[in-house]
Image (spheres, helix red, strand yellow):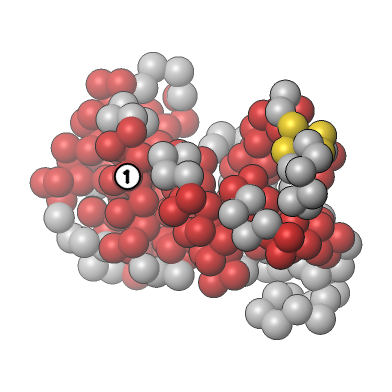
Amino acid sequence: MTASSIVFGRKAVILAVIIGVAAMFVTSFVYRMNHPNLTVQVEQMQQDRAAAAANADHDHDGDGVQDHGNNDAAATPPPGMGEGMPGLAPGMGGGMSKIKEYLAAVEQNPNDVEALANLGNSFLMMRAWDRAIGPLEKANELQPGDTEVLKALGIAYFNKEDFVKASAAYDEILEIDPNDTLALFNLGVIFKHYFEKPDAARTYFEKVLTLEKNDPEMIKMVKDELKN
């Protein structure tokens, strides 16, 4: 396997996450080239959770009183990497208020799935992969079957180069929705570029072409994968 093939595989997985604007909050040109859409997906995850929270009440503080969902807290992604936090890049403070909010909610109620997911997604946007995995795994244990949490776990494990666990997350998604084209495509890339199983990869790619009708960029990427 050539170095260019590995770079292409990494770029393809992240590109397939979502079609949209270029990523924010990155510190190097190389990272922008290889991961153009990571934060867009995470932002969308948080926006989806915000919409759900707007229609539901939650007892976050455990006092028996239903607290109303906070749209802004869930919908607004942290704008940078907090200073003074091990493992995060310095000089990009401003997002720590949300992190602290989610941490406080988890401290008060360790089983608050929404707070755990938001905490994990916030760390994911900061590229703090190790920190993201803990709360996301806990959220997945407490509420299995949340495909947005599983997609976030797939991103985190992929960037840690734990391709076995990344593929397991996408497998779980397919158990819930066998026609999830993002999971199918990402598995195809992992099997082709990292597991070196081109026949299995082709099966995933061909299923994407059968199912996907509305995403021209994904269709193009699948066809490119099948050519090479």
Q: Residues within 10 Å of mark 1 (few under 14, many from 20)?
A: some
Q: From the viewer's perspective, tell me whether residue 25 is left or right of residue 30.
A: right
156 w.r.t. 72: above or below: below
Residue 123 in which image quadrant: bottom right
Residue drawn at the location 27% of the way across and 58% of the way down? 193
Residue occupying the far top of the picture: 213
Q: Quadrant of the N terminus?
A: bottom left
Residue drawn at the location 21% of the way across and 31% of the way down? 206
Residue occupying the far front of the picture: 64
Residue drawn at the location 82% of the way across and 34% of the way down? 68
The residue nearer to you, when weighing 195 against 49, is 49
Q: Position of residue 136 (x, y in %)?
A: 53, 57
The residue nearer to you, when weighing 126 against 32, is 126
Label 1: element kind = helix
Residue identifier under label 1 = 172
Residue 27, visible in the rendered structure: yes
Residue 155, visible in the rendered structure: no
Q: Position of residue 52 (x, y in %)?
A: 67, 29
How many marks can you see?
1
